[in-house]
Amino acid sequence: MSKNIDLIAKLAQMLQEGKDIEEIEVSSWGWGRLLRKLRVKKSPRILAPAPSVVVEAPPEIIAIKAGLVGTFYYNNDKPLTVGDEIKSDDVVGIITALKLENNVESEITGKIIAVEVEDGQIVEYGQVLFKVELT
């Protein structure tokens, strides 16, 4: 039996060293073995890090939304328009509901980039009234 083990060890060594040999099958006097070449997976190549690219972030846009259902009215005779500057706590409009006037206040400072409602328009809770670019 030790002759068989020695033979298998030699064949296994030949299998690992041989570039063209993938497997060896040995059988003799009622026993047999199939030897296959051990394949080691190569780890992926580590690439050099890509150079960093500076990308200018787009300005942050925040929506001022209706806090309740009702009718929206501009705060003054002069409605807010695109390009107008607003500050935190400015009253940007009024929503009336059940004959009560509720101020719509800005929580941010920025520039109006879109007016999404008209004076006298019925608005839903969460509806966007204005879009503001932070400054």
Image (cartoon, grey):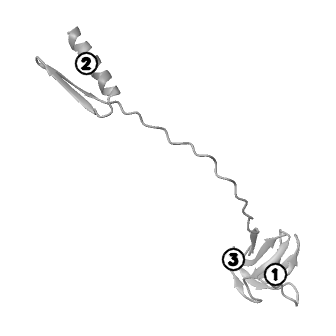
Q: Which residue is label 2 attached to?
A: 8
* Residue found 62% across the figure and 46% down from its top: 48
How dense is the environment of label 2, judged by Cα within 10 Å: few (below 14), some, or many (20 and up)? some
From what the image shows, is residue 68 above or below residue 40? below
* Residue found 71% across the figure and 78% down from its top: 69
Q: Residue 18: percent from the left, percent from the top?
A: 32, 29
Residue type for callout 1: Ile
In this view, the residue farthest toward the top is 2
110 left or right of 31? Answer: right
How dense is the environment of label 1, judged by Cα within 10 Å: few (below 14), some, or many (20 and up)? many
Of circles 2 and 1, the one toward us is 2
Please state, as top left, top right, bottom left or bottom right, where the C terminus lies in the image: bottom right
Sequence-wise, the earlier of marks 2 and 1 is: 2
From what the image shows, is residue 83 above or below residue 5? below
**The disc label shown at residue 94, or none:** 1
47 left or right of 111? Answer: left
Q: Secondary structure at mark 2?
A: helix
Q: Residue 9: percent from the left, percent from the top?
A: 29, 17
For residue 105, say whether it is visible: no
In space, the residues marked 3 and 2 are separated at their CA atoms by 79 Å
Q: Secondary structure at mark 1?
A: strand
Q: Are circles 2 and 1 on residues that touch, CB within 8 Å?
A: no
Sequence-wise, the earlier of marks 3 and 2 is: 2
Residue type for callout 3: Gln
From what the image shows, is residue 12 above or below residue 40? above
Q: Secondary structure at mark 3?
A: loop
